[in-house]
């Protein structure tokens, strides 16, 4: 029986065994990755360069774009390399790093989405207190708390998961390293420690969800009391992108982890994990830019500046 000290690498699940299809998957991953880099990069640059966007809402959006870039860069480059070179291997350290960064970015993003719900609540329900409650120092503290909670949670889960003895081989039934699939390789009852950590994380997720839900109940009540149709439209237009991002983030994640075992299969698990780990970071920039005129204007100015420079 092998233990974790004798495992030097893990074998990830390939999307296909056919070389031509692997190259097709590489091209697909590359296209999605470049789209995510471009979309999130444009949002980062536009917000950083346009002083009109130096507000709490766009400060949090800038952090969201950074987290999206981080999460998609944790999974796709390795998947692209494996598809291109027809290999499945990832080192023990590389697997640990994937789990550390994925938990960090996903946890921090969910915390940040909760903070953004609070930002929308204050802006719509308590506009007179907005500058006092969401000053630059308060925003920096909330963003730091989101990143810090993600980091602490990531260290806790990674240390707990990789302290377990592994004796069920080294084949991970996923295209990236994921905690539940590493736990399947464990041969010790010590995995209950990681289950305890997961229960703690789920409790925090539920707490954040309740906070977001209560915030939006208050927001919609306040919006419906606005007399002018233009005012209601403006209030809704600032909330809908945030709601869409939360819905995409939660629905894909919940389906990935809470789908019934009866419908579970390696191919379905692969598709679902792709949906929750790759699609949101690539689609979020599109969601936020579709209805946001200020962001569109800033991106347009950025393009005009780039064209004039050339």
Image (cartoon, rainbow, N blue to C red):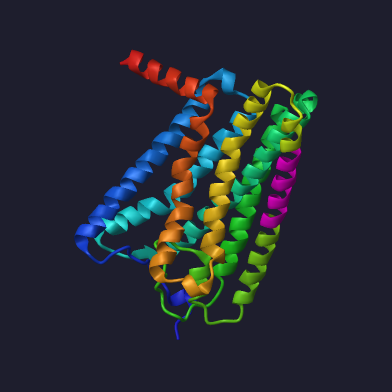
Residue nearer the viewer, 110 or 226: 226
Residue nearer the viewer, 301 or 269: 269
Q: Total label count?
A: 0
Span highlighted in magenta in the image: 205-218
Q: Quadrant of the C terminus?
A: top left
Residue nearer the viewer, 124 or 228: 228
Residue 302: name its quadrant: top left
Assign the magenta stretch its main secondary structure.
helix
Q: In the rendering, at what x and y percent does residue 262 appear? A: 50, 75
Residue 30 vertical placement versus 55 (above, below): below
Q: Residue shown at 63%/27% (left/top)?
A: 233
Instruction: Looking at this view, name the residue that lies furthest to the top.
Output: 308
Q: Is residue 206 magenta?
A: yes
Q: In the rendering, at what x and y percent does residue 65 appear? A: 51, 38
Answer left or right for 151 relative to 35.
right
Residue 128: name its quadrant: top right
Q: Residue shown at 25%/53% (left/top)?
A: 24
Answer left or right for 79 relative to 122.
left
Residue nearer the viewer, 77 or 213: 213
Q: Quadrant of the N terminus?
A: bottom left
Q: Residue shown at 37%/19% (left/top)?
A: 306
């Amino acid at each position: 029986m092998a233990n974790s000290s004798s495992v030097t690498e893990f074998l990830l699940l390939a999307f296909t065994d056919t070389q031509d299809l692997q190259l097709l998957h590489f091209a697909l991953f590359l296209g999605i990755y470049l789209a995510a880099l471009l979309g999130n990069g444009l949002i980062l640059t536009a917000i950083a360069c346009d002083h009109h966007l130096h507000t709490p809402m766009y400060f949090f959006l800038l952090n969201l774009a950074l987290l999206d870039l981080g999460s998609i860069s944790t999974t796709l480059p390795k998947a692209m390399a494996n598809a291109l070179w027809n290999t499945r291997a990832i080192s023990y350290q590389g697997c640990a790093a994937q789990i550390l960064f994925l938990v960090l970015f996903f946890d921090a993003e969910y915390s940040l989405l909760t903070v953004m719900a609070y930002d929308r609540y204050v802006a719509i329900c308590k506009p007179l207190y907005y500058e006092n409650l969401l000053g630059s120092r308060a925003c920096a503290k909330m963003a730091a708390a989101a990143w810090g909670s993600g980091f602490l949670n990531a260290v806790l889960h990674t240390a707990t998961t990789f302290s377990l003895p592994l004796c069920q081989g080294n084949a991970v039934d996923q295209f990236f390293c994921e905690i539940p699939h590493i736990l399947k390789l464990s041969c010790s009852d010590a995995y209950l420690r990681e289950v305890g950590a997961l229960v703690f994380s789920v409790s925090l997720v539920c707490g954040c969800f309740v906070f977001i839900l209560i915030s939006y109940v208050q927001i919609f009540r306040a919006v419906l009391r606005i007399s002018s149709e233009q005012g209601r439209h403006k209030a809704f237009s600032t909330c809908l992108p945030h709601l869409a991002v939360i819905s995409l983030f939660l629905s894909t994640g919940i389906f990935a982890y809470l789908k019934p075992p009866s419908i579970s299969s390696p191919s379905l698990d692969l598709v679902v994990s792709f949906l929750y780990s790759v699609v949101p970071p690539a689609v979020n920039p599109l969601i936020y830019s579709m209805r946001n005129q200020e962001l569109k204007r800033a991106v347009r100015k950025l393009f005009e500046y780039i064209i004039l420079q050339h």
